[in-house]
Amino acid sequence: MSDHRSDSFGCAGTAFLLGGAIGAAIALLFAPRSGEETRDEIRRFYDRSRARMGELQEDVTDRIAKLVDEIQEKTSELVASGKAMAEERKRDLQEAIAIAKRALDEERALLRRIRERGREGVNAE
């Protein structure tokens, strides 16, 4: 939830800076100064705005890099836990199969004994 708020704040900050830049440019154009003073003021304003935009771009780039790192870390954790879970389930399944085989062997042995007794009973008659 805090990431969403920081993204909203970043968008609002960008909009605020853009609005301020437009307002300042309009104010400079209508200020009672000479052309050269106005051009110098616009140039300084442009340089400051450009620096601010560069800082914002660096901030956004850093945030994206952090997000990518977090996503990669979480993905690695999920894959590792998935592998561990799969191994555990595989062992459980192998154990269940071994138990089922033993039960099947016991049932087969019981069936053989019953058949043998039946044959002995038929042969005894």
Image (cartoon, rainbow, N blue to C red):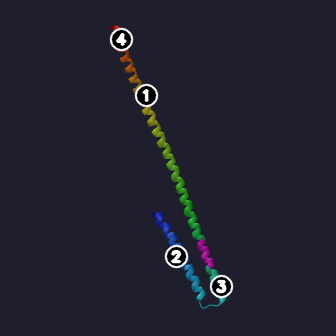
To which quarter of the image does residue 48 belong?
bottom right
Nearer to us: label 1 or label 4: 4
- SS category of the residue bearing label 4: helix
Q: Which residue is mark 2?
A: 16
- Residue 39 is tagged as 3
To which quarter of the image does residue 114 belong?
top left
- SS category of the residue bearing label 1: helix
- Residue 12 is tagged as none
Of residues 69 and 12, which is closer to you in this image?
A: 12
Nearer to us: label 2 or label 1: 1
Q: Position of residue 115 (x, y in %)?
A: 37, 17
Q: CA distance from mark 2 to mark 3?
A: 23 Å
Q: Position of residue 35 (x, y in %)?
A: 66, 89
Q: Residue at x 49, y 70 (%)?
A: 9
Nearer to us: label 4 or label 2: 4
Of residues 35 and 101, which is closer to you in this image?
A: 101
